Every structure is written in C-alpha cells, then in structure tokens.
Image: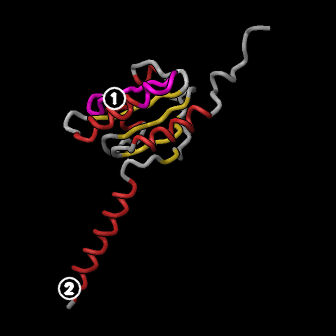
Amino acid sequence: MTGIAVLVATLVAGVVAGVVMRHRNGRPRSERKERAPVTGDDLGAELGERATLVQFSTAFCQPCRATRRILGEVAAMVPGVRHVEIDAEARLDLVRRFDVLRTPTVLVLDGSGDIVTRASGQPRKADVIAALGAAVDRPSHRSSQPSDKV
C-alpha cells in the first residue's frame, strides 16, 4: 500500500511540475536582479539605438531556429532595434553572467543596455512585441546624460 501512495505522489508531483514548466515556457518575465548595463563590447556586437533582443542559442537547439526567425522579424519591424544572437557554448562567460539555464533564452535590453525582460524557451511573437514595447517606452540612461552643449 505504501508503494502505491509513493507512486501516486510521484506522478502528481511530476504532472504539476510539467504543467508549471509548460506555462512558463517562452513567457517573458521582468528581470529581478540589478545588473550593470550590457554594452556592445560585452556582446561583441553593437546594441540597438532603442532596444536590443539578445538570443542565447546552441547548435543543436531546434526551437532556437524559430526564435531566430521571430526575433529577426520583430527587430525589422521597429526602427532602432537590433537582434543579436549569442552562441551559448562559445560564450560561457555570458551564460554564467546572465544565468542562462537553457536555450533559447531571450533578453530584451532597453536603449541603455538594461535588461527589461527575459524569456526561457521559444517566445511567442506577440509576447516579444509586448516586451519590446516596454523596453522602447522606458527612459534611456544614455539620453538622460548631461550634454556638453550650453
């Protein structure tokens, strides 16, 4: 009888964990950690003027291909937005720095390089557009710096 109870408890725990993971897959969530702004030197590519979509991928990742297409389309729709793809296997320093646990992982940066949202798993296009809207509407630290003009 104890064996059946353990089996049922294990199955219930597995189903609950699966449902939670499926619900969170690809959904953007706000960044909770305060981090130093990301620069073009960090990524090895120029940041977008208004926002940057950073994608961590690996060669064997099937959802990364679809994510690449989605992010490329969204970046092409909005002026001043760039899509930068990072090979997670080649850039383990960035994987550790940004706590990337799986691919694809997408970071949405505002114009000043601050992480606004992140998504693990393949995001939906509508979610990327919404996250990008929040990043673009955010005041940029770059534009708020004092000017030399008098």
Which of the marked residues, 1 or 2, is nearer the chain's N terminus? 2
Image position of 102 (left or right of 38): left
Query: Which residue is denoted by mark 2 in the rendering?
Result: 4
The Cα–Cα distance between marks 1 and 2, rounded to whole angstroms, is: 47 Å
Q: Mark 1 belongs to which amino acid?
A: Ile
| The magenta segment | 74-90
For this view, does 92 lie left or right of residue 45? left
Residue 124: which numbered mark, if any?
none
Residue at screen point 30% across, 33% down: 88
In magenta stretch: residue 78: yes
On the image, numbered disc 1 is attached to which residue? 86
Residue 81 to residue 119: above or below? above
- In terms of secondary structure, where does tag 1 sit? strand
Element on which disc 2 rests: helix
Indicate the position of residue 52 as horizontal and vertical percent values. Answer: 47, 28
- Determine contact: label 1, label 2, CB under 8 Å: no
The image quadrant that residue 118 belongs to is: top left
Relative image position of residue 53 (x, y in whole percent)? 44, 31
Say left or right for 98 vs 34: left
